[in-house]
Amino acid sequence: MQLGTRWSVGAAVPDHLSAEMQEAIAGVEADVAHLDTSAWRWTLTWLESRPVAELDDGTIVRQGADGSVSVEEAAS
């Protein structure tokens, strides 16, 4: 695993992520827009050269080997 970067909810997503990853992250942020996410951050790592973005609440957005993007909701 390789650490990528961290950024705040609502800030610019790293532009080296695919459009599909960026769209999925934007969708997650829209879903939590009603919450106070001012202190929340995304952590981007790379697993087997594929991006995995984890939000502080435990939500994970990952890109598979086939290019598909999945969102795993945080456990409630």
Image: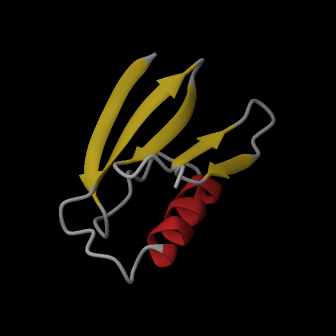
Work out whether residue 37 or residue 8 is closer to the camera in this orientation and state it: 37
Q: Residue at x 65, y 40 (%)?
A: 63
Q: Is residue 10 left or right of residue 54?
A: left
| Residue 29 quadrant | bottom left
Q: Is residue 12 left or right of residue 25?
A: left
Work out whether residue 35 or residue 12 is closer to the camera in this orientation and state it: 35
Residue 28 in the image: x percent, y percent?
Answer: 52, 66
Residue at the front extreme of this rendering:
76
Q: Residue at x 54, y 35 (%)?
A: 51
Q: Residue at x 56, y 70 (%)?
A: 27
Compared with 60, 23 (above or below) is: below
Compared with 39, 1 (above or below) is: above
Q: What sort of colour scheme is used for the picture?
A: secondary structure
Residue at the bottom extreme of this rendering:
34
Residue at the right extreme of this rendering:
66
Residue 37 in the image: x percent, y percent?
Answer: 27, 68
Compared with 28, 7 (above or below) is: above
Q: Is residue 6 left or right of residue 48?
A: left
Residue 20 in the image: x percent, y percent?
Answer: 65, 57
Q: Residue at x 40, y 19 (%)?
A: 2
- Counting the numbered discs, the total is 0
